Image (tube, grey):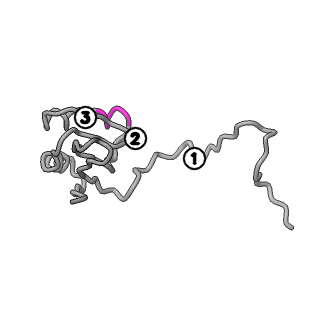
Amino acid sequence: MSSSNKKVWSSDDGRQNNQSTNNRQPQPAGDGVVRVSRQTKGRKGKGVTLVTGVPLEGPDLKDLAKTLKQRCGSGGTVKNGVIEIQGDHRDTVVMALAKHDWVVKKSGG
């Protein structure tokens, strides 16, 4: 068995930070396509428009959600990086997101 300097597991050193991962920029999750869909599951029949795959985070994502909600004239929220807008506003949202030079697709039925 060859010896290696790499630790597999140890509780002696406490928390270990890997410096190489802290310097990298976060990559957008997914395949780079912004998808707009409609969902009614778990919402007592009420439909919402879901926007996933947006390459923004934090306050920028919330600002985009705010402009989309104003454009659609309805409420909504941001949960786990997904923008939820109350009602079926897929066409309006797709047109608004296309102005940001992102690849936007309608998904679902």
Disc 3 secondary structure class:
strand
Residue 99 is covered by the magenta coloring: no
* C-alpha span from label 1 to label 2: 22 Å
Q: Residues within 10 Å of mark 1 (few under 14, many from 20)?
A: few
Residue most toward the bottom?
A: 1
Disc 1 secondary structure class:
helix
Q: Where's the C terminus, which quadrant?
A: bottom left
The part of the chain drawn in magenta is: 58-62
The answer to which image quadrant residue 64 occupies is: top left
- Three-letter code, disc 3: Gly
Q: Is residue 15 left or right of residue 68?
A: right
Q: In terms of depth relative to the viewer, which is nearer, 23 or 93?
A: 93
Question: Residue 48, percent across and down?
Answer: 23, 43
Q: Residues within 10 Å of mark 2 (few under 14, many from 20)?
A: few
- Three-letter code, disc 1: Thr
Question: Residue 84, percent across and down?
Answer: 28, 40
Residue at point 76%, 49% (across, down): 9
- Numbered disc in front, either 3 or 1: 3
Residue at point 39%, 56% (across, down): 30
Residue where numbered disc 1 is placed: 21
Residue where numbered disc 3 is placed: 76
* C-alpha span from label 2 to label 3: 13 Å
Q: In terms of depth relative to the viewer, which is nearer, 44 or 16?
A: 44
Secondary structure character of the magenta stretch overall: helix
Residue 60 is covered by the magenta coloring: yes
Residue where numbered disc 2 is placed: 80
- Numbered disc in front, either 1 or 2: 2
The answer to which image quadrant residue 46 occupies is: top left
